[in-house]
Amino acid sequence: MATEPSDSPDVLWSPPRERVDGSRLREYLDWLEQRQGRPFPDHDALWEWSVADLDGFWRSVVEFFGLRVTGGDGRVRTDDPMPHVRWFPGARTSWAEHALRLGGDDVAALVCVREGGGGAREVSRAQLRHAVAQAAAWLRRNGVRPGDRVVAYLPNTEHAVIACLAAAAVGAVWACCSPDFGAEGTTGRLAQLEPVALIAADGHHWNGKTVDRREVVARLREGLPTLRHVVHVPVAFPSEAGPAGSTPWDDVVSGEEPLVFDQVPFDHPLWVLFTSGTTGLPKGLVHSHGGILLEGTKWSGLYAGMREGERLFSYTSTGWALWNIELGALLQGAAVVLYEGSHAFPPGAVWEVAARTRADLVLLGAAVVTASASAPRPPRELHDLSRLRHVLVSGSALPPAGYRWLLEQVSPDLRVDSTSGGTDISGSFIGANEYAPVRAGRISGRLAGVDCAAWDEDGHPVVDDVGDLVVTQPMPSMPVRMWNDPGGVRYAESYFDTWLGVWRHGDWVTFHSDGSVTVHGRSDSTLNRQGVRLGSSDFYDVLDPMPEIAETLVVGVELPDDGYWLGLFVVPAPGHELDDALRATVLDALRTRLTPRHRPDELVAAPAVPHTLTGKKLEVPVKKLLRGTPLARAANPATVDDPEVLRWYERFAAERGPLRPAAAQGS
């Protein structure tokens, strides 16, 4: 399998020695040297040991961070192959207890901000513990027991964090949808769980508007027949009473009950995260108390390096896995900044919030970085970001220009940490560490305890070549199962149908000789031309930052007789059109900055690019439409940001009929 050669990009930033020596990662490595009786000079040494002695590594995380994991038969995991392995068999724990145990009473636990400026309202550790105690007591009084499902329809406010922690404290299973989901998309997810309680807001704030969601909540109540209780959260209309038959939020969090945590089995369900649901019914991934406790502690402690009193600002919604991941900050006694609103209202809002809340770390999607770069003035000229030491980027690969923009326009002394993982594991496979330099367009490397690699079609590891991202040893935060999946059939088909006992994630990646990693895109949407795999993200890195272009979508369609059609849909920026001059510019950029193989067969002017509600481009559904799949089978419109855009691609496919390779347009 051939691939295009690529030199290692220049180092944009290297960690100062004093930063490395003062990090929590170095503190852990010093402790590990004493325990293991051997040196651990850097993260590379840690990774090598962590995959050679996987049980020893995860036991060290439990011991170093003082996690309460009681009982069990002494084993870290069973000998079963993936996906049947079980962690700390027989042991019991509580994720919620660990999230609330650290931090003084007066220290901030949550910092709540709403779009449009104004103050930042702090919820102290004492206030959070009290609210969770009362909400958990309310759930118990109303018959909610371990294993029952508590679901929510809430924006990114303190109510969601309190309700999630309360549900976990009683051993109930949590699931949440963001209010930007409509009734159909939300019901399609939550109805699968047969919930007993719904906690729902009356609306949310977005882009300068108050969005009324009371009608959606009413439809949810009708579509969830197993509900016994509904809690009304006044977010958009605080002066108005809730619907009949609902319990006011203030009644749920009032009282003086003690804080009690049900100790549950290590693999007891904590929450259900749903796949994007671009086709069919969204699949529910069940994560466990113990798995999320271990993964969240490793990430927040060793990689985010958070300490008590620090602050993590994550730009996310409650319907995205980043929301669940950000709660790992609480495990270290750090605070979480909760922002309700649009990242672009006003323009550059995320950086203003980071400055106003004195954030030490920012976690956000790559698309937000790209959008920020178009602002007329850079954040460093407008805001005091002197406390910000670390920006973590997820959701999709950060383009090389994004790395440079962050260091030049946000802060020159910034650890830019592009990561890749996702909803599947509620965490990351690859990312940066305190020892790693920052290279434009490259993820620094593997994370400890993650035995991942790139494999070719024959199951052989490849280096400096494109391959399938696989994980060859289990991770504790892999789902314990999928919801409503008797016998684990769908789970096995989703991740283990290619190589027995090996997790195939569905991404094309390159593991480079220097240890860094490039993510090229989803393997079911990655382009394969003349035996060379072309990542869709490579196209976007080159084209999407161009001022004449708002966004692009690249799709490859296999044709009869080994034919192949590589189409590039171009959304011109306002004031521009896809004329001959722009076509020539696009083709020249792809040819010179990538390779001649990246030259598309056709450039098509499009009104917009369809995305999931979490911002991912819908490459696979568009590919299916072009191959003749009906829209109803290609995608679920309820999970798309603008269904009408997807219908445009449906009409385009119908008008074109069977696709045939065509000469590339332009020079």
Image (spheres, grey):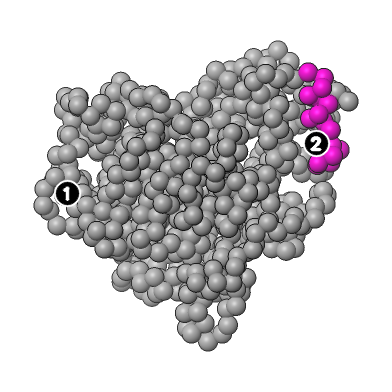
Height in image: 548 above or below 69? above
Q: Which numbered disc covers residue 590?
A: 2
Instruction: Look at the image and tell me whether residue 503 can be seen.
Output: no
Res 379 → quadrant: top right
Is disc 2 placed on a helix, strand or loop? helix
**Circle nearer the N terminus (1, 2):** 1
User: Quarter of the image holding residue 619?
Assistant: top right
Q: Residue at x 61, y 23 (%)?
A: 608
> Are circles 1 and 2 on residues that touch, CB within 8 Å?
no
Q: Is residue 600 left or right of residue 393?
A: right
Locate residue 155 relative to residue 556 in the image: left or right.
left
Q: Residue furthest left?
A: 256
| Residue 306 rendering spot, x and y as whole percentages | 43, 62
Q: Which residues are magenta?
A: 579-598
Query: Measuring 57% from the left and 52% from the top, which residue is drawn there?
Result: 411
Main SS, magenta residues: helix
- Mark-to-mark CA distance, 1 and 2: 58 Å
Q: Quadrant of residue 616?
A: top right
| 1 vs 2, front mark | 2
Q: Nearer the viewer, residue 131 or 164?
A: 131
The residue depicted at 74 percent of the width and 32 percent of the height is: 556
Instruction: Give the number of the disc on residue 152.
Output: none
**Residue 93 in sight in this render:** yes
Which residue corresponds to mark 1?
A: 134
- Residue at the location (64% across, 63% down)? 14
